[in-house]
Amino acid sequence: MTTDHGILAPAWAATGAGGLVGDHALLAAMLDTEVALAEAQAELGVIPAAAAAAIRAAALPGNLRPAALAEGVRETANPVVAFVGQLTAAVDPAAAEYVHRGGTSQDVLDTALMLLCAAALDRIGRDLLACAENLAGHARRHRDTPMAGRTLTQHAVPVTFGLKAATWLHLVLDAFERVRRVRASLPVSLGGAAGTLAAYQQYAGGDVEGTLRLPDLVAERLGLAPQALPWHGIRTPIADVASALLVTTGALGKFAEDVLVLSRTEIGEVTEERAPGRGASSAMPQKHNPVFATLIATAARQLPPLAVVLFGSMAVPDERSSGGWHAEWQPLRECLRTAAGAAANAVRLAESLHVSPEAMAANLRLTRGAIVSERVNAVLAPTLGKAAAKRLLAKASAEAERTGADLAGVLASDVDIPPGLLDPAGYTGLSGPLADRAVTRFEEVFKECS
Amino acid sequence: MTTDHGILAPAWAATGAGGLVGDHALLAAMLDTEVALAEAQAELGVIPAAAAAAIRAAALPGNLRPAALAEGVRETANPVVAFVGQLTAAVDPAAAEYVHRGGTSQDVLDTALMLLCAAALDRIGRDLLACAENLAGHARRHRDTPMAGRTLTQHAVPVTFGLKAATWLHLVLDAFERVRRVRASLPVSLGGAAGTLAAYQQYAGGDVEGTLRLPDLVAERLGLAPQALPWHGIRTPIADVASALLVTTGALGKFAEDVLVLSRTEIGEVTEERAPGRGASSAMPQKHNPVFATLIATAARQLPPLAVVLFGSMAVPDERSSGGWHAEWQPLRECLRTAAGAAANAVRLAESLHVSPEAMAANLRLTRGAIVSERVNAVLAPTLGKAAAKRLLAKASAEAERTGADLAGVLASDVDIPPGLLDPAGYTGLSGPLADRAVTRFEEVFKECS
Amino acid sequence: MTTDHGILAPAWAATGAGGLVGDHALLAAMLDTEVALAEAQAELGVIPAAAAAAIRAAALPGNLRPAALAEGVRETANPVVAFVGQLTAAVDPAAAEYVHRGGTSQDVLDTALMLLCAAALDRIGRDLLACAENLAGHARRHRDTPMAGRTLTQHAVPVTFGLKAATWLHLVLDAFERVRRVRASLPVSLGGAAGTLAAYQQYAGGDVEGTLRLPDLVAERLGLAPQALPWHGIRTPIADVASALLVTTGALGKFAEDVLVLSRTEIGEVTEERAPGRGASSAMPQKHNPVFATLIATAARQLPPLAVVLFGSMAVPDERSSGGWHAEWQPLRECLRTAAGAAANAVRLAESLHVSPEAMAANLRLTRGAIVSERVNAVLAPTLGKAAAKRLLAKASAEAERTGADLAGVLASDVDIPPGLLDPAGYTGLSGPLADRAVTRFEEVFKECS
Amino acid sequence: MTTDHGILAPAWAATGAGGLVGDHALLAAMLDTEVALAEAQAELGVIPAAAAAAIRAAALPGNLRPAALAEGVRETANPVVAFVGQLTAAVDPAAAEYVHRGGTSQDVLDTALMLLCAAALDRIGRDLLACAENLAGHARRHRDTPMAGRTLTQHAVPVTFGLKAATWLHLVLDAFERVRRVRASLPVSLGGAAGTLAAYQQYAGGDVEGTLRLPDLVAERLGLAPQALPWHGIRTPIADVASALLVTTGALGKFAEDVLVLSRTEIGEVTEERAPGRGASSAMPQKHNPVFATLIATAARQLPPLAVVLFGSMAVPDERSSGGWHAEWQPLRECLRTAAGAAANAVRLAESLHVSPEAMAANLRLTRGAIVSERVNAVLAPTLGKAAAKRLLAKASAEAERTGADLAGVLASDVDIPPGLLDPAGYTGLSGPLADRAVTRFEEVFKECS
């Protein structure tokens, strides 16, 4: 046994995400699957109701020995063979016959993994919504707070912090909608040995209609969606989960990367909450590191490569592949807990982010007007011509930078500039109305989901 | 200039996919974008109608010098600065002022890339549907053709080739639906220097409502979806394209990998079409290689890693990042042409696939009955008990394999086996009804899209 | 706490690889690092010898509370701040002052991870050599055992199983040499807060020479290589480990993928050992799955994407990045245990692989001579011309395939074929001498390392 | 045909890297390979000298029709079958017989790709050395220029710019050494249809020794290393190239990411050269973007995922795989030109980087002493105890930050601080001697390679 406390996993350490998909949760989901199968078969009259009850009674985590299951993985390339053995041994002998009847390893493991996906996506969805709520607050409060817009690391034109927060919010809502959609589509997996349901049918005395209904009954009991076809070899459900998680960590990663830039010592426009010990260094007493942003950025770096394994496992031969299916399990778990950790940390980051309009204002003044040279260009272009205006402004900006003078002053010798034209706060464009759009979208989503 | 004929790109060589996203198509799309912007501004009264007409008149690929655009990329990190210069130089001087008015590089390049996505996804969608139609034919024709189901490379239980084709069909329809959904959602990109639309508004004399409508008008002219917010820093549209393409090559890759296995010399259940030169070797006269399947398998291997770059570029700081945005372009192009090549080759593979029910029947007999031992197990379990039955059958199977005897014969000494129980053709489970489901799904999709 | 028994990790379950890099091993390595640092400082006279002894006495895993360390990760983005606190609390108060003196979190964690790399690479090296030894045995025994060479899934020309095994052997030796090289180069990491060693120097009363020697002394005590520069921001050591592991799983993956093909039911040229329960199915009594090959193939699929994170973390800003460094830890651990698991399973696969020269011979006859048509071509070309000969043979091969006749018979009507020319066993080329080369290479490596 | 000017490829546009591995270079390398093979066979007496001369005479790019080769890729899954046809048609009929004698497609394509690798690695090596020379200059000039060290985006302790440049230099030298090592090891590829050299031997009248020498003779003529075994299925050479390229873009990416941070508007410690048009924006006249750093950062983002395909292609079955081998070509080309572009841009970045010691000094003062609180801690710890000192300093730093006071002033009320202790320039640790180490390493490498 290896314990994994998350000491090397900043993406999800201490967020509770580890437990969502840990061995305990997995085994519980596998037990739930066997119970649901037995009960559905009982409902169809394929096995005695008493047998299903006995299986439910024995389906306790305490009846399993996880270390032996890991041994079993090395014996049979999956844990289900040993798992069925352990479960069967725990069941009342009169009912043992009816455990896993007609089932195959992939039925149990795929279904159990879908249950883990459901739990993780539910939590991610909740956290994304909580994060969005906080971001909507920032977007509202700072709808008109001007700050420097930055492109390719350089001051570009002004924006508002409200629009910045709205950008994050929009991304988080994109993630939320994808998570919600895929959550609702997670299918049960029931195919039997090679996806024909043959053994289930055999045990059902050849009954076609009943056997076709069996997967639906199992799905209902487990809160999963029905399957269209057995999907041992149709891995779209896994790919869809991966896509939703990628958008999740991508969205939160954008938020985090922006926070990391804005909280740089020289910029200081946002700061993570100060709390005792938070962001401390082992060496430097003055340090107050942006911890949540770092943890989320970590998650965003890790997820895309992990997801490659999942997408890659779509293209494998046979009714069940040797290696493709098996390669999905650990990366899927890792993707789920990484994204869930990121979502949990994003709630904390969003709710505790300290914003400094003063620092934003100070930074806006740094280029002494050059940050609105695009505007001046637009004003001068109609008279000077666009190219000439741009040349004039490039020259003036360079001179202002070299001499430390204000752009307005440098320009004054060449052209007439209306007063206020170089005030950055006056050139935030449609930041406000655009921020409103994201807030409105949030409100609609929130109403629908609350 | 580097010419790229596709000599090193089996994934898309000679499929026409290269041209869909080549430099010529890109420049045409960039020109279309500038024209649509000018015309929309003219419609709003921001620029003279004559200026828009002059811009349209000058927006000819022949007015561009691509090599100088590549030089421009190294000067300014994107081709748009040089492109706008070249276009402006070609426009009637009286209208030159109005080119790219208020625009920023990312507006033009992102919108143009969406147009390339649209063209590629349209073609991929058509090819997926054509492929699906052929696969539906196979599923219908071979609904009840028994063959060996294989798991972990070994014969498992029988399936039908109809179910196999239905599996491919279902995957292709999954891909088709995702491609269609994302195609409909491809947004125009218009934000101005930092996503506030400020310069557009400035040139529009401060008009808020008109400026908010501008992106919608451009979108309409280009056949793209409206944008909710400017998305320079909200890369969900790229992620969604990547997800749809991943499902596409994953789905087609599964089809290809199955064909590669089934066409192995020792298996021979399917064969690619024989045509002069097709599948020839430079050395071995007898060779008839599965070429289309190989080309598709190549595409399926290449796409997931390429997509990592796209997902990774979501999580970058600033209103426009330095490196994240830039890293998207070439991989996006590569993903589009790789997936489009795979779809084109999949049509050919599906339409020309030769199926051999005889080889399937012969292979089904290879294990002399062991392929239905699961069924025998199900029959014996009620009397012998599941575990005892499984032990008996494992022993009998091993003995049959060792001695070359039929499983039925070996078992006869121990138990009574009903006649016909070991006929593989009698144990294909619900292969037929399940294949029907996929065909029905195809018919519904086809009706809706034709 | 999440326990991870490896139930979802076929790549390393039950191989012991999990424990090599588990939390317990990590904490032990972190303790070793602090002890080595204290003792080296004592040797330099920077701290009292008694303090170093007290630190060693307290450096017991039992003094640590791992769950609190995980909490600490979420507080400070790394476990070291909390770890130093716990260790300090356990040390004799008189020596507590001297714990982690001048150190920074990255010093401790990077060094500890190098110790984990060392342990894992040592084990991987041993297993690769054991695997190579078994493969050398196959290469010797089957130096001249003919079998079908296969390209693009089709029979091409004959090879020998000895050459096949030699190919695997050569790859394994490639991996071994890279693992050994990188093992020898694993450096200690000591830089202090920003890589200047300033605090170490400060505590050493400004001593330049002593402080420059400090990392070497720590390295010696830990069995690591010296560092050239502090490498907090120079991640070549991690990249080198990743490269060696990639070659390891790539090499073993080739071996596994070949075994998977050769053990297909229709091919049957090799089989994994039969042992009770090994390769069993939960459903099908007759199943004997190639388990070790599947486990190794799983590892080979998982490693390359994981390594992307490691290579990607080279390109990050600052003296220590926010996210780049943190993103390395879990994937590095995962890469190490995945590769170590693959190596352990490869020993088992190589030592127990059953080879069937009979099946090889039978398959060689499958194409009734066409597998040597290249040879016939070479014989006929000088008289008929290469192109004409190739056309003749392509036609004859196709006819032979269609009619089920022998190629020799079909050709006899057109040309004179010397007797024996179409015997596959006579056309294995230089398989034998080439196999010898790999065996000789193994013997040299083995002699050097034993 | 698709022309690819690099318009979407900032990583290598206009650097000349595209041409190194373009179709023209590839075809030239394929022709060189066929010529070398013929001449080596002539040397061994296997074909007439006149035939080799005729093949050389016809081996002109003008004799090839690339578009038809791309068509050929779709017919036979590789371009060599069509290529050999075109070459044969161009050769004097008397010698046509001797073209590609005994050869297989993979021999020609793998060898040609190794020639492309050689050309690209040669150029990358030269550029890395030129970049290193410039970085060594920075490291020498700024050996003792103090600046803020930054960790997790926050000021940590002082470093010198010399050490920063030394860090980049060290990385570049790491890359250089790996590139040089792998360049020297690039092997010829000659195996014949399935790696047994059988057809070469057949045409050589069965000659074993001569046939074993043939690959060495071809390698010599092409300036490649000999092969140990035919490596159609042993892809270590490709993996080694990938590893070296990954370290290259990782190293240069670190340099670029640091430049991007240091050239932020608020930081301004380094600036890329100002040149007309360089770094211009299409919208904002004042913009001076860090272009070379952006281009290099782009390359560093793209390479790791591309390399995944290459490592993934190691683990494929058969003497030649269907899809694995084919998937290597385009990503290998892309990796080569991406890394070569990055190296070319890094020369420009390093040679033209403007450094501002004034900005560094100003930023060092930003925290008013807190940047040396680690030092104060070290000084106070012996008297106050480490933990108490750290608490005191954390409190004082926070107060200084809140009030805008100097740390020294705040501390003065509690403790005695020696004058000068809080001068950042006095706490750069061993930055100087460590920078010297990297410079010395450069000088040794440079001497050896000049």
Image (cartoon, coloured by chain):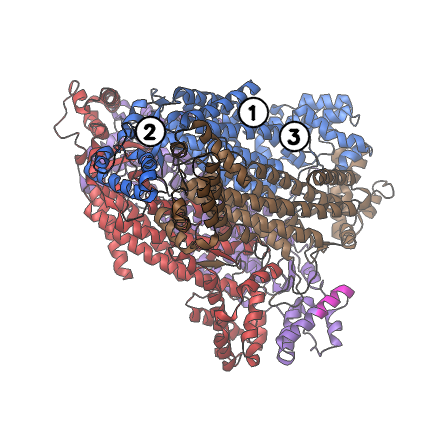
Chain colours: A purple, B red, C blue, D brown
The reply to whether label 3 and label 1 mark residues of one chain is yes
Which sits in the foreground, D400 or A68? A68
From the image, tell me which residue sits under label 1.
C122
Which residue lies under the disc numbered 3?
Answer: C86
Disc 2 residue type (three-letter): Ser
Task: Based on the picture, tell me whether residue B148 belongs to the magenta stretch.
Answer: no
Q: Residue at x 51, y 74 (%)?
A: B209
Q: Main secondary structure of the magenta part?
A: helix
Which tag, 2 or 3, sits closer to the chain's start?
Answer: 3
Label 3 vs label 1, nearer the camera: 1
Give the letter of the chain under mark 2.
C
- For the record, the magenta segment spans A395-404
Residue lying at the far left of the rendered structure: B419
Q: Is residue A217 visible?
A: no
Task: Compare residues C403 and D235 and report the one nearer the observer.
Answer: C403
Could you tell me residue A145's position as x and y percent? 63, 64
Residue occupied by mark 2: C263
Q: Give above or below for D92 relative to D219.
A: below
Chain of the residue on which disc 3 is drawn: C
The type of residue carrying mark 3 is Gln
